[in-house]
Amino acid sequence: MMKKSMKMQDAFDPYLERMVSQSETSSGRIKAKLSDSYSWCFCELCEKPTEYSAILEAPKVVKRLQRGNAKVVSRRETIYAAAQERADALALRYEQACEGKFGPYEAARMLMHYCDIPEMQGDRSVDGFREQIERKMLFAEWARHGEPVWTTRLPGQTDGDAKPSKLYCETHNPRRSDDARRAYQRDRRFILEYHDFIEKIWSQVINAGSHPTWDIESHAHVRREARRQLQVLKSPTSRIGDFLTQGTMNQAEIARHLGVSRQAVSAAIRRRAKKSAE
């Protein structure tokens, strides 16, 4: 039998305070998820980021020591000052480029080189450019003092914990805790309905032109709305709080709107009152 091919890469283990070799899975399911430009970073069962994508958002810079050890390079004031100086210089050049000082294409070239165009959401102003480059200049300056790496664990995780999941968030990773396993088992039953809601909502917002498909925030919004509609499907009385806040309908009208009995609405209101009192 052929062994599964494994790609190895160096990563910093904050618990051991040393560099370790970490294997990348060749699972077809994982590869398919990571190949999607947008959904790769979202949990399969909700709108939260996966544990893996949360780690990618928090890189570290380390300095290698003897015998495989390493230490995190702190971000000193001098690093912040140097990064700010670099950002100021680039922002000034971009402002001059927008005025045509360096020809008709320099401003566009700087946008393509330094910025995440979809994330800018059409904001091509100097302030929008500066917002994009400040974080990047800080990391670039920080990286000059060591080696940029990504950690092997989430904050608070210790030796022996499961490595960050590429499929689930911390709330739904069944290997993370008993509560997470229960949440996984509860929501896994409705995964088909959840993704069906996502497709339906996307068709609605695309037709309405309200949420561009290239915007990552649009994907997060669609998943939140799909999650909300799924909760309504599982428990129609979960929306009672919204109607009570509006104060425009009585219990009988709420029951007709939700498609449940008046007794179910009354019982749900009593449960809400009891929970609030506790």
Image (cartoon, rainbow, N blue to C red):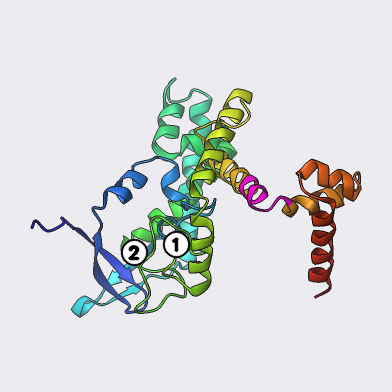
Three-letter amino acid code of the residue under disc 1: Ile
The image quarter in which residue 202 lies: top right
User: SS class of the residue under badge 2?
Assistant: loop
Tell me which residue sits at (43%, 75%) in the image: 157
Say which mark, if any, is on residue 79.
Answer: 1
Mark 2–mark 1 Cα distance, whole angstroms, equals 9 Å
> For the C terminus, which image quadrant?
bottom right
Three-letter amino acid code of the residue under disc 2: His
Q: Nearer the viewer, residue 259 or 32?
A: 259
Say which mark, if any, is on residue 98.
Answer: none
- Prevailing secondary structure class for the magenta stretch in the rendered image: helix
> For the N terminus, which image quadrant?
bottom left
Tell me residue 258's x, y (percent). Answer: 76, 44
Tell me which residue sits at (84%, 66%) in the image: 273
User: SS class of the residue under badge 1?
Assistant: helix
Q: Provide the residue designation for mark 2.
A: 145
Q: Is residue 73 left or right of residue 197?
A: left
Whether 272 is drawn above or below 114: the answer is below
Whether 30 is drawn above or below 153: the answer is above
Tell me which residue sits at (83%, 48%) in the image: 243
Q: Are marks 2 and 1 in contact (CB under 8 Å)?
A: yes
Q: Which residues are magenta?
A: 229-236
Q: Is residue 261 left or right of residue 53?
A: right
Whether 211 is drawn above or below 275: the answer is above
Tell me residue 180's x, y (percent). Answer: 50, 68
- Is the residue marked by circle 1 packed among few (<14), some (14-19), or many (20+) residues within 10 Å? many
Q: Is residue 177 left or right of residue 211?
A: left
